[in-house]
Image (cartoon, coloured by chain):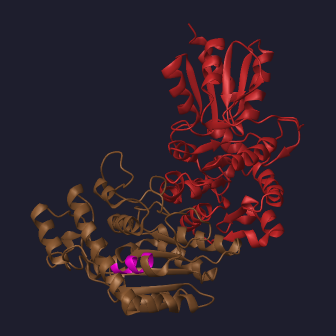
Chain colours: A red, B brown
Amino acid sequence: MTEKIATREAYGKALVALGAENRDVVVLDADLAKSTKTIDFKKQFPERFFDFGVAEQNMMGTAAGLAAAGKVPFCSTFAVFATGRAFDQIRQSIAYTRLNVKICASHAGITVGEDGSSHQSVEDIALMRVLPNMTVFVPADAVETVCAVRAAVTIKGPVYIRLGRAPVPVLHGEDFVFQPGKAVRVREGSDATVIATGIMVASAVEAADILEQEGIRVRVIDIHTLKPIDIDAVVGAAQDTGAVVTAEEHSIIGGLGSAVAEVLGENYPVPLKRVGIRDTFGESGKPAELLEKYGLTPKHIVSAVKQVITRKK
Amino acid sequence: MRELLMKLEAKAKEIRRYIILMTAAAGSGHPGGSLSATDIVTALYFAVMRIDPKRPDDPNRDRFVLSKGHAAPLLYAALAERGFFPPPELMMLRKLGSRLQGHPDMRKLQGVEMSTGSLGQGLSAANGMALAARLDGRDYRVYALLGDGEIQEGQIWEAAMSAAHYRLDNLTVFLDYNGLQIDGPVEEVMSLGRVGDKWKAFGWHVIEIDGHDFTAILDAVAEAKETKGKPTMIIARTVKGKGVSFMENQVDWHGTAPKAEQASQALEELGRRS
């Protein structure tokens, strides 16, 4: 069993390291510092940590002002509030202005679990991806999270980083090279490709193992940057394997599935199957129960791969 | 002082003339709320703020956030008159490819400190700038202008709370209290209640003035600078459409541009170029 770490935990630690190196880094939260893990930064650098209470819109707007004056604000809250409650603030004051604000939202997707649908963001990627000037990172594990946070600082402009609540397997080693906008091949195979993001990358690898036992070899692509999406990797997968399955803990409308469909449709159409939340809200339950009920397990990826292979010409 | 007041009167007149000329040339825009806040913004740009059009990126400059972004003609006229760009460009307001967008865009025009237009957001941005000044140990001051209809937005009160919480005494905010919004009198559309008491209750230092009296504006700004430990709200009673008889207190001039003959009457009332 590989080690499991929640991406939000990795985020908290990455912020502290960053805070020590860069005095312009400031951290903003909206009464969820213990959950988003910005509390680690708060303990270390209290003078550079600002709590806004339960007021996400003002947090985003204040971040814009801090950035306009040269600071590098990291804003954290749950993904559903960051992107939903404060969408217009992100659109008007951060994306349109191209200000250097990093929105690092935790508790994304249905693995939030028992809190239920009000707290389960299944549309945040769609909301952030549609905004001009926005870079969107969806790290698959703790290693990618640290890399994404560091990459975000080198990008002059708004960045959205999607983080999860539940512990997920650590997929990458310390030598992992993270290039923004560049997808990572984690498995090689020629029968089909599974393009996965976030916590679904680990499930895609598991699915590949199951399929291999049945003689089906799939390429698995870990796509940590949803925007700008790696067009070459997506088109290359279609050319080399002739069929694509996407896997995301997000609505299949507007997220990774849509992004891949857009790239394939315009460049190299091949059979596609999207594994994700199928246009519905979530509910309360244990993360594993929810992943099962909403069709987000390795087993579901396996059946999607088999289906898509039958449609190959 | 007398000399300064005369200069401000002349600048305000010139800026009001530009507002009429610009909106007439554009065929759209918001003259009413630009004219109501003209004296406040004129005082800021010509008597209060530490700014230098030759060094628009100076980290020590004072900042002004036009939270009521629809008063863009006023901001542009003030910037042009202050030397940030040549006044003839004002006639490009709202035209395709222009730096003078319908609502201010900080990425298109230097001197614009924050892009605004979606009401209720500028105060948060001003708070952020004020916090940054403190973090960096800089002594610049941040000014913001809110509309009265604008403070119906919930985000304003979130920002009001946090400015007091973080004791932003380097922040001075004006409320352009002209009493009119698009759908009618503010008191009929969504009454603001006891506005001064509200800001006081949120922890602000509150000053109420006549927003067309330069002495009162300058005194209030001076009082704000002396006020420690809390931000200052200057509630400025103003007249929408101020300076143009047929526009004054007329709600329909919120977002309607003058036609050619109306523009020339307005310019006549505002007097010849000084």
The spot of residue A75 in percent (x, y) is: 65, 60
The spot of residue B203 in percent (x, y) is: 56, 88
Q: Is residue B195 left or right of residue B259?
A: right
The spot of residue A214 in percent (x, y) is: 77, 14
In this rendering, the answer to whether B130 lies above or below A111 is: below
- Residue A28 visible in the current orientation: yes
Q: Quadrant of the C terminus of chain A?
A: top right
Q: Is residue B43 left or right of residue A186?
A: left
The residue positioned 69% from the left and 31% from the top of the image is A182
Q: Quadrant of the N terminus of chain A?
A: top right
Q: Is residue B161 left or right of residue B40?
A: right
- Residue B190 or A70: which is nearer the viewer? A70
In this rendering, the answer to whether A270 lies above or below A98 is: above
In this rendering, the answer to whether A88 lies above or below A272 is: below
The spot of residue A296 in percent (x, y) is: 66, 36
Task: Tell me where residue A188 sits by quadrant.
Answer: top right
Q: Residue furthest left?
A: B261
- In the image, the segment drawn in magenta is B39-45
The residue positioned 66% from the left and 48% from the top of the image is A161
Q: Residue furthest top?
A: A313
Say if the magenta span includes residue B119. Answer: no
The residue positioned 57% from the left and 45% from the top of the image is A134
